Image: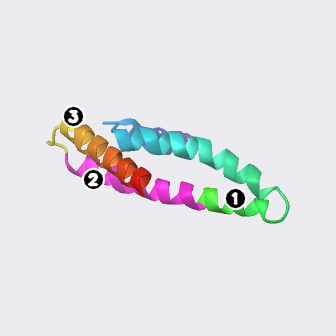
Amino acid sequence: DSNWEIMITEFIHFFIKRTTVISILSLAIILIGLPFGLYALTLKGGQSLGGVITLMIVLAVFILLVFERAIIQGIQDFNLKRINIIESIIIISLLIIYNLK
């Protein structure tokens, strides 16, 4: 029983320690997308496809989050403020490119 508590505590600590822009946005997308995707799976016909697509996006964001967390944990001496600025520039650039399409 205490092993589960230790594992859950370490898991939460892994995602909360040294938070970045991508980690905050990813957690928000996962927390919003997971219930929505599961609900959409209960709908009939083609509407349930929205749930599958949403859950695939949530899975991709989760993989991105784990990858980003591994990089952040591996770079202990790097300035976290600089990482947040770089991530913000990348996200803003992608949003501009997407909207100009």
Q: Earlier in the sequence, mark 2 or mark 1?
A: 1
Q: Is residue 97 left or right of residue 38?
A: left
SS state under label 2: helix
Q: Which residue is mark 3?
A: 81
Q: Is residue 62 left or right of residue 53?
A: left
Q: Is 59 a magenta residue?
A: yes
SS state under label 1: helix
Q: Which residue is mark 2?
A: 71
Question: In the image, which is nearer the foreground, mark 2 or mark 1?
Answer: 1
Q: Amino acid at mark 2?
A: Ile
Q: Are marks 3 and 2 in contact (CB under 8 Å)?
A: no
What label sits on residue 50 in the rendered view? 1
Q: Earlier in the sequence, mark 1 or mark 3?
A: 1
Q: Amino acid at mark 3?
A: Lys
What secondary structure predominates along the stretch shown in magenta? helix
Q: Earlier in the sequence, mark 3 or mark 2?
A: 2
Q: Is residue 23 above or below residue 71?
A: above
Circle 2 crowding by C-alpha within 10 Å: few under 14, some 14–19, many from 20: few
Quadrant where the C terminus sits is bottom left
Read off the magenta span: 56-75
Q: Residue 10 sits in which quadrant?
A: top left
Q: Amino acid at mark 1?
A: Gly
Please tell me which residue is depicted at 53% across the width and 44% down the height of the picture: 29
